[in-house]
Amino acid sequence: MGRGAVRNVSPIKVMALVTSIMVIIGMVFLAVGFGVNKGHQHIKAVCTEEVNALVVDIKYDSSGLGSPVYRYDFGGKEYKTNTNTYSNHPPYDKGDTAKIMISPDDPEKIYVPTDNTAGMLSKIFMILGGSLAGIGVLVFILASAVIKSGRRQQMQNNEPWEM
């Protein structure tokens, strides 16, 4: 085939490829959302001991998002830790006191009931993923129906199928 040659590519194949990519990306988003949610539920389940903590600092990541650093006592020992969730508006400011949940087996593992960053993030990923996958499937079904009806009409009129 020379330069600028016309290729006869089936519109259904092109549409199937595009919508398949949409569905795959949607499924990846869904998987990430479910994974974040599962991790959030796990930490919530193992952190069963409530303690009072003092926010001694705000730890910032490279993009400027913050996570409070909590100091608390448990079993006669002092601990200082933060969660792995960072946000534009951390749930507490430096100097605040907070009720947090810790794991009695691993007191540095904490859950902050007022911090809904992980829960919100998982919902956003699941909604986006489900929407993208659903739209991909819907577009494929609708476009297939339109293309097939166009072919059927051209065949009834004894016209060659062209796209």
Image (spheres, rainbow, N blue to C red):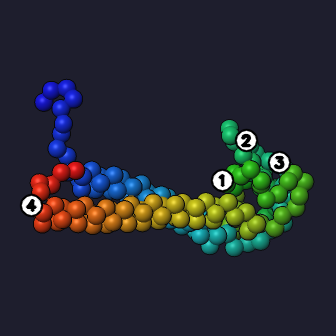
Give percent across and percent down for residue 144: 27, 63
Q: CA distance from mark 1 to mark 2?
A: 14 Å
Q: Residue at x 76, y 66 (%)?
A: 114
Sequence-wise, the earlier of marks 3 and 2 is: 3
Q: Residue at x 29, y 54 (%)?
A: 15
Element assignment for label 3: strand
Q: In the figure, 148 relative to 160: above or below?
A: below
**Residue 57: mark:** 3
Residue behind mark 2: 64
Give percent across and percent down for residue 109: 67, 60
Give percent across and percent down for residue 130: 47, 65
Callout 3 touching callout 4 (CB < 8 Å): no
**Which mark's residue is nearer the viewer, 4 or 1?**
4
Sequence-wise, the earlier of marks 1 and 3 is: 3
Q: Residues within 10 Å of mark 3 (few under 14, many from 20)?
A: many
Give percent across and percent down for residue 128: 52, 60
Element assignment for label 4: loop
| Amino acid type of the residue tagged 4 in the rendering | Asn
Residue behind mark 1: 84
